[in-house]
């Protein structure tokens, strides 16, 4: 993958039809193509710039089954303390790419935390998510990867893979918990 700075991509917002359509799989040939390699670089830079901990291709208006994930375990919005990070089982995750992912629930016990989405800008809500999941996918070279994830990482994967099926967190949230990001900071965030 190339490392030069890419042009930032436009993140589409809720209401854009691409966010609600199931995305299509990529072939290995497509994965290795300049177009998809360039999309990966652009999504990485766009996610870091936002900043976010994950980004799915439909969020930049491209209906293919590709996500990027990276968590530096630091959120300026939530201002999480070490204790909060630990309660969420949130640890740093290296940048990686998952293509054509399939997800299965390892531990159906759910945890509930506030989530936000770069495509539902300005809002947050509590979303129940499975505690641990198994994901099989291809990486940016088209090689198979298998991931067992728990805690916050499992939450990120569930959120991002939902995007590939046209699902947003608002479809799964506890509706009465919906808050603006400003009011989250004012009344809820510590
Ligand atoms: Zn999202």
Image (cartoon, helix red, strand yellow):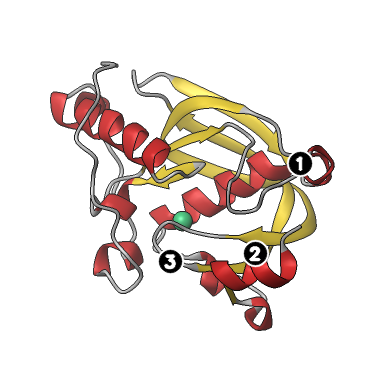
In the rendered structure, the answer to whether residue 125 lies left or right of residue 98 reads: right
Which one is nearer the viewer's eye here, 107 or 85?
85
User: Pointer 3 and pointer 2: residues touching (CB < 8 Å)?
Assistant: no
Q: Residue at x 64, y 35 (%)?
A: 73
Residue drawn at the location 64% of the way across and 29% of the way down: 92
Q: Is residue 154 above or below residue 167?
A: above
- 3D distance between C-alphas at marks 3 and 1: 23 Å
Residue annotated with mark 3: 120
Answer with mark 1 or mark 2, whichever residue precedes in sequence: 1
Judge whether residue 167 can be spotted in this image.
Answer: yes
First in residue order: circle 3 vs circle 2: 3
Give left or right: position of 6 versus 189.
Answer: left
Residue 179: % across, % down: 60, 75
- Residue at x 69%, y 44% (from the top left corner): 152
Residue 27 at least partly seen = no
Specify whether tag 1 is near ligand 1 (CB below 8 Å). Answer: no
Q: Which mark is residue 185?
A: 2
Q: Circle 1 is placed at which residue position?
A: 85
Q: Residues within 10 Å of mark 3 (few under 14, many from 20)?
A: some
Is 177 situated above or below 129? below
Residues under numbered marks 3 and 1 in contact, where contact means CB atoms less than 8 Å apart: no
The span from disc 1 to disc 2 (Cα, nearest Å) is 16 Å
Mark 1 crowdedness (10 Å alpha carbons): few <14, some 14-19, many ≥20: some
Q: Please, is residue 3 above or below residue 69 in the view?
A: above
Q: Where's residue 71, x and y in %?
A: 57, 34
- In the rendered image, the quadrant that contains the C terminus is bottom right
The tag earlier along the polypeptide, 3 or 1, is: 1
Question: Residue drawn at (46%, 39%), measured in percent from left and top?
Answer: 101
Q: Nearer the viewer, mark 1 or mark 2?
A: 2
Q: Quadrant location of the N terminus?
A: top left
- The spot of residue 117 in percent (x, y) is 48, 58
């Amino acid at each position: 993958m190339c490392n030069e700075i890419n042009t930032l991509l436009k993140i589409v917002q809720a209401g854009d039809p691409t966010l609600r359509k199931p995305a299509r799989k990529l072939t290995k040939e497509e994965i290795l193509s300049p177009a998809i390699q360039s999309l990966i670089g652009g999504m990485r830079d766009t996610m870091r710039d936002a900043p976010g901990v994950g980004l799915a291709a439909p969020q930049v208006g491209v209906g293919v089954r590709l996500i990027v994930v990276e968590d530096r375990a630091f959120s300026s919005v939530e201002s999480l303390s070490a204790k909060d990070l630990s309660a969420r089982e949130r640890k740093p995750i290296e940048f990686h790419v998952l293509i054509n992912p399939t997800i299965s629930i390892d531990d159906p016990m759910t945890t509930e935390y506030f989530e936000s989405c770069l495509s539902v800008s300005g809002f947050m809500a509590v979303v129940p998510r499975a505690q641990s999941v198994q994901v099989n996918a291809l990486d940016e070279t088209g090689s198979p990867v298998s991931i067992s994830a728990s805690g916050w990482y499992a939450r990120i994967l569930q959120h991002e893979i939902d995007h590939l099926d046209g699902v947003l967190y608002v479809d799964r949230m506890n509706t009465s918990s919906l808050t603006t990001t400003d009011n989250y900071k004012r009344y809820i965030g510590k």
